[in-house]
């Protein structure tokens, strides 16, 4: 129990620039207190002392302003920052390293008993202030939910969901660029960020160069196959679905980027 507490305090010191000492965190962080109440309530819930568990959770809510149903599963190093108004439903699962800000609801849209009504937040998810994540779906590893968003559908790993109804911003481009960066051992995002025009032009050029590399690799693979298998090589094997068989050079788009 004390090692979990130490871990919780360390994670708050890491993630909140306003936290200065472990004593301050221990005394002044309702998110930490709510998790301690929840652990007690959850262990009673699992032993089927349902009313007592609900009562402890109710006391925890009274003292912290954070309502966590005792049936909810909360992982390690979860940080509920500020916390007032947070509601976490019975079937919610919050995996390790998640961060949840004030006013967040992890709730349901259905009253049907027996089905998973509340969401699962996979590892490292961040849910911004006053966001509502409603339903028994999953928010993927490392995804971010913007403050005030209302999310009613799954969010892919690494994606950012904002707005009401929530829409995914940038997930595909970022995922593709990160894959490219991993392949090249270099990430333009690591150098500059945001709307800087030079950075945007760099990103556009890198995307373009990487698409060319990919097409060249496909050509060599097809050539190899033809050389090895001769007439036995089928067209479907040699021309994969992402091979560009027609010219697609976006001169206009690239010129706009470098202007
Ligand atoms: C969602 C979030 C993580 C996105 O951060 P980011 O990746 O840096 O995104 P950007 O700021 O570059 O914004 C990208 C786009 O999303 C929009 N956007 C960002 N956050 C938004 C939000 N919460 N709601 C609606 N739109 C949002 C931006 O306006 C921008 O739109 P545009 O491309 O049309 O200009 C961040 O904005 C957020 O809401 N964090 C939660 C912070 C919080 O709750 N803090 C509480 C402290 S007490």
Image: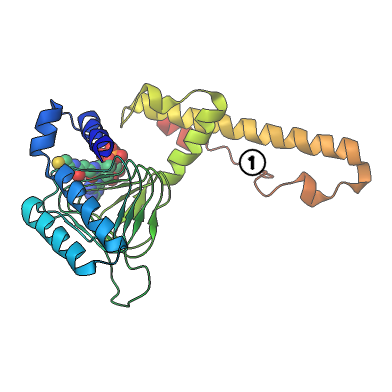
Rendered position, 154 above or below 9: below
- Give the crowd class for mark 1: few <14, some 14-19, many >=20 residues within 10 Å: few
Determine the quadrant in which ligand 1 lies.
top left
Q: Position of residue 142 (x, y in %)?
A: 38, 42
| Residue drawn at the location 30% of the way across and 44% of the way down | 98
Note whether residue 38 is visible: yes
Q: Residue at x 32, y 63 (%)?
A: 91
Residue 114 percent location from the top left of the image: 36, 74
Specify whether 15 is left or right of 119.
left
Quarter occupied by residue 194 = top left
Q: Nearer the viewer, residue 204 or 191?
A: 191
Colouring style = rainbow
How far across and how far down the image is residue 20, in percent? 13, 25
Residue placed furthest toward the right: 231
Q: Which residue is mark 1?
A: 247
Q: Is residue 1 left or right of residue 198?
A: left
Q: What residue is drawn where x is 41% and y is 50%?
A: 140
């Amino acid at each position: 129990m004390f090692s979990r507490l130490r871990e919780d305090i360390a994670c708050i010191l890491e993630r909140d620039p306003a936290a200065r000492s472990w004593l301050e965190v221990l005394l002044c962080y309702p998110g930490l207190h709510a998790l301690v109440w929840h652990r007690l309530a959850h262990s009673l819930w699992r032993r089927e002392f349902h009313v007592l568990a609900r009562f402890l959770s109710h006391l925890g809510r009274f003292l912290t302003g954070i309502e966590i149903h005792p049936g909810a599963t909360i992982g390690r190093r979860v940080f509920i920052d500020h916390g007032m108004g947070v509601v976490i439903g019975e079937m919610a699962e919050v995996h390790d390293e998640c961060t949840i800000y004030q006013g967040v609801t992890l709730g349901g849209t259905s009253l049907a008993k027996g089905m998973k009504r509340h969401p699962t937040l996979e590892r490292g998810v961040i849910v911004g202030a006053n966001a509502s994540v409603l339903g028994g779906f999953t928010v993927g590893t490392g995804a971010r939910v913007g403050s005030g968003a209302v999310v009613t559908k799954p969010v892919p790993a690494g994606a950012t969901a904002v707005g009401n109804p929530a829409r995914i911003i940038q997930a595909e481009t970022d995922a593709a660029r990160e894959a490219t960066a991993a392949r090249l051992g270099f990430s333009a995002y690591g150098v500059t960020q945001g709307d800087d025009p030079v950075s945007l032009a760099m990103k556009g050029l890198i995307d373009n160069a990487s698409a060319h590399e990919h097409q060249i690799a496909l050509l060599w693979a097809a050539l190899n196959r033809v050389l090895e298998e001769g007439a036995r090589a089928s067209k479907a094997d040699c021309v994969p679905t992402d091979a560009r068989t027609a010219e697609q050079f976006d001169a206009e788009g690239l010129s706009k980027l470098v202007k």
